[in-house]
Image (tube, rainbow, N blue to C red):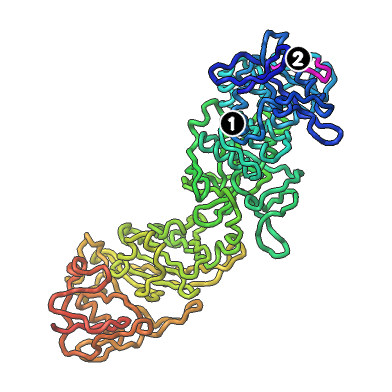
Amino acid sequence: MRLINCNEVYRLESFEASKVPKYAILSHTWEETAEGESAEVTFQDFESHLSTQRNDRGWKKIHQTCEQARSRGLDYIWIDSCCIDKTNTTEFSEAINSMFQWYSNAAVCLVYLSDWGETTLGPCRWFRRGWTLQELVAPCYVHFYNSEWNYIGSKDDANNERLARITGIDRELLGATSPEEIRHRLSRTPICQRMSWASRRETSKIEDEAYCLLGIFDIHMPLLYGEGEAAFIRLQQMIARTTNDLTIFAWKLQRNMVVKHNPRNIMRYDPISKRYGPGPLEAARPEPNDYHSILACSPREFMSGGRIRTSHTNYRIYNPEFSITNKGLKIDVPFSRTGPFDVKLLPLNCREEAEPPQIFERPVGVSLRWFGGDVYARADIDDLPDALGNCSKSKSQNKLYLALSVNHLYDAIGTLYRNSIRLPDLDKMHPGMTEKKVLPGYMWHKDERLFVTYGHQSPFGCISYRVPGHTNVIFRVFFGLKNGSPFLCLADPSSKFFPAFYELGGAFLARVRMPAAIVQTPRIEFTVGKKKQRTSVIVCGSFKGGKHNGEPIHDLVLSVEMKREEADSRASVPERSMPSARSHSVVTSHTTPPFERIGKWPLPTMGNSPVTDRGQTVTFDEAMDSFKRTGWIPPLVTPSEERPCTKSTEPTDTPLREVNLARINKKESRSGNIEQPGCRRTESNWCRVSYEEV
């Protein structure tokens, strides 16, 4: 650290950090000559003892500072203009990161108000400069002098209240008398309040808006002049790594504020092209439908942060943790809905004073707009909505990523809901028929009952419904898109082909497109119950066109018919075909009528398809009766037009072997094929299946 010796010959002396003597420090605003050049004495000028007309005012300032220091018994002073070699980038960066500490360690800070000639403090230029903020907060003792070097007061006397009114800084912080107390009170002050102190201050370079706040937030980071407003975003990211104070998000753009933003951080709607894109390069006012990254671009956006209050001093203990990742700012916190399911409210655990102040303060939060997956961006950037009155009672704990830039989200809005599928709520028609699980879970939005496909052309999902009165009996609905057309496959509880796909869970369904082995099945019929208490369930499904937020989607329509069967209607069914109670007493009957054209996709007619049985050609219903008698249920396999059958199709006179359902459960492979001793499969084409002796 370099200091100026205040004795008869002014000279610069260097000291190690542990051997620095007591010194006074000068806080001032840099002045210019009539030609626009700097009137301050630089490090090179001081070393050369130059005293030209260009810097006469600068030398006079140094002389007056030395006189005030000697009158207080101090032999050294520090002035930023001549004690730092700004041509040395390493030294300059070290000085900027250490400046708050140097002002804090000074015996007294002398503030020279070059444009203020009054005998009392007032709104002069010194209160509008960015660098002078830490020069007011850091020192324990600050003495003010007007343009004639007349003493007009200090920050810890009667001027305390006036300074608090001019700067917005708390009186308790201005009245702190030790560096430890100053640090303690700073750490207890919410981030948005500290940002508001700099919201009305200016700097010569845009990067200095961030660099002049390093000491206020106790942050150290390298200086990169030329990065523009990215310096302030980098500062906020550094702050987020050291604290979980949610008030760092309590910023908003004033509606009458004309700002210029980086296109990486703001996204605006173009009414001509009817698309979202980067914000204008020129300065413009914020619009209600603008979207923004979660971090502010300038301290000016925290102008209303001075009205933010926290519930208590240890409020950070109860805040959730959040961290910076390469996907965005990850946070796990209960979110509240503020309207549509794609708009959520992040409560900030703080309150805002009303204007004019009222008895009650309202809790505030920030609106977040969903852009697909688990990524959200800031919405309603000109407002901090009410976190209590504008949200629903239901809250959900979610791990979300808040976008740090929006330039990769432009195309997400127009395709977010395209080709999505809206699933029905069967519980309203049949109480108790609730869904058990939806896969993949990240694509399912229960509030809107919407399966969002994010514009994918071949998505695939599955939903399971419980049967009322039989909570452990479920039937599944496989749905998706095939070549852009909706696809539906209903699976009854006894189907053994589908659990292999279902048990793999969301990871499988998210990685694999529509399996080729699944065929369209828009109708299933099965029975539940035991013996005399049996209920027949018929489920039919179809698709119809719909819209969500103006984008075309597919509505899945399911109709369910449940009726009680009489006891004598099951007399023809042999006892061996009745499963035990442990297997939910389910007997499935595939009595599917001829398929019809549903939606846009044509389906083959199979009502009169021949089925080989004992070497004879029979109808489909006769074959199903034969299957019931033997207790064997044919699995659904790929249609012949999709996967031609290559196995033997010649009829055989050998009767079908009886297959026990319990043995099927144990011996059935994951692919759905049935392995029985003494039999081999000779044909697998739609539902035409026969077995012959090996």
Q: Is residue 436 above or below residue 675?
A: above
| Structural distance between the alpha carbons of marks 2 and 1 | 32 Å
Residue type (three-letter) at the residue carrying disc 1: Glu
Residue tagged 2 = 153
Q: Residue at x 67, y 53 (%)?
A: 289
The percent coordinates of residue 343 (x first, y second) are: 58, 51
- Front one among 106 and 352: 106
Residue tagged 1 = 94
Q: Residue at x 73, y 37 (%)?
A: 204
Look at the numbered disc 1 and give the secondary structure of its residue.
Answer: helix
Look at the numbered disc 2 and give the secondary structure of its residue.
Answer: strand
The quarter of the displayed image where residue 23 is located: top right
Instruction: Assess disc 2: are there few (<14), some (14-19) or many (≥20) residues with their C-alpha within 10 Å of its C-alpha.
Output: some
| Side (left or right) of 431 relative to 532 | right
Q: Is residue 5 magenta?
A: no
Chain part drawn in magenta: 142-149
In terms of sequence position, does the residue under pointer 2 or pointer 1 come before the other?
1
The percent coordinates of residue 134 (x first, y second) are: 66, 26
Q: Is residue 188 above or below residue 638?
A: above
- Front one among 32 and 673: 32
Name the quarter where the C terminus is drawn: bottom left
Which residue is most to the right?
Answer: 34
- Front one among 686 and 408: 408
Q: Is residue 146 magenta?
A: yes
Q: Is residue 505 above or below residue 39?
A: below
The percent coordinates of residue 278 (x first, y second) are: 66, 56
- Residue 352, can we see it? no
Name the quarter where the N terminus is drawn: top right
